[in-house]
Amino acid sequence: MTLTAEDRARKIKIILFDVDGVLTDGSIWIIPVPVAAEGGVVSKMVEAKGYSAHDGAAISLARLGGLKCGIITKRISETVAMRARDLKLEFVYQGQAFKMKPIREIQEKEGVTLDEICYVGDDVIDLPVMRECGFAVAVADARDRVKAEAHYVTPSRGGRGAARDAIEFILAAKGVLDQCVDAYIDESNPIPPSMDIGKGGDLKS
C-alpha cells in the first residue's frame, strides 16, 4: 500500500531542518566589521543570516504537539548556533557534509525509527536523508530534483515560512494543529519558557 503524505506525517516524532535555503532564503551576508588591533584597525568578517519569525513560532507549536526539532547543516556559523539556542532546539549538528551520520546518532539517542523522522531540505546534499527518512519535505524553491523526491513540497519558500508549513502539515495530519494553536495563545495558561522561543535562550557564544 502506498502511503500518503498525511500517513507519513502522522508517524513523525522528530523534525529536522537544513539551514541555508530552508530556515533562511539561502543568502549569506559577509559583513566587514572594524576591530581594534595592534598597529591600527583591521576588518573582521562577520556572517549574517535572516530567519523568519513565523518559522520560529512554529517551533513552539511543534513542541506543544509533542515533536522534537533540530538542524543539520554543512556550514559552521555562530549565527546558526545563536538561532538554535534562541529556539532551544533539541538537536544541533553543524559541519555535516554527510547528514545520515547525525541521523543515526539521533536514532540511537532517541530510540526512534527512520519512519518517525521528518527532514526538510532544499538541495542535493539533503537527498540521502530525504531518501531514507519517513517524511521528506522540500521547500517551494528547492532544486527540482529535490522536489521530485519529496513526499511533500511546502507552499512557502525557504526562509519565508517553509518550516512553518512543514510543522503545521504534520500537526494537522496528527489532528492536533488547532489544539496547539489554542494552547499557544491561551493567556490564562501560558506555555513554559522551556517550550517557547525567545524566553531565556542564551545568545552568548
Image: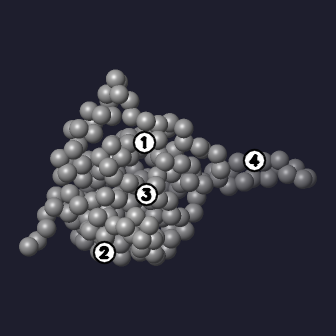
Q: Earlier in the sequence, mark 1 or mark 3?
A: 3
How far is the residue under mark 1 from the one under mark 2? 29 Å
Q: Is residue 102 in sight in this rendering?
A: yes
Q: CA distance from mark 2 to mark 3?
A: 17 Å
In the rendered image of this protein, does residue 36 appear above or below residue 121?
A: above
In screen coordinates, is 135 left or right of 15? left
Nearer to us of marks 4 and 3 is 3
Lower position in the chain sequence, tag 4 or tag 3? 4
- State which mark lies toward you, 1 or 2: 1
Q: Are marks 1 and 3 in contact (CB under 8 Å)?
A: no
Give the numbered dot on residue 70: 3
Q: Nearer the viewer, mark 1 or mark 3?
A: 1
Q: Secondary structure under badge 2? A: helix
Please give the residue where the numbered disc 4 appears in the rendered image. 34
Q: CA distance from mark 4 to mark 1?
A: 37 Å
According to the image, label 2 marks what residue?
132
Residue placed under numbered mark 1 in the picture: 195
Residue drawn 24% across the image and 53% down it: 170
Q: How would you rate the neighbour count of disc 4 (Cα within 10 Å): few for under 14, some for 14-19, many for 20 or more? A: few
Amino acid type of the residue tagged 4 in the rendering = Pro
- Which residue is nearer to you in this view: 198 or 152? 198
Residue 122 visible = no
Task: Give the residue type that dot 3 points to.
Answer: Gly
Between 71 and 23, the one nearer to me in the picture: 71
Separation of residues labelled 4 and 2 (CA atoms) = 46 Å
First in sequence: mark 1 vs mark 2: 2
Q: Is residue 42 left or right of residue 91?
A: right
Residue type at numbered disc 1: Met
Residues at circles 4 and 1 in contact by the CB criterion of under 8 Å: no
Residue 191 x %, y %: 39, 34
Label 2 neighbourhood size at 10 Å, few (<14), some (14-19), many (20+)? some
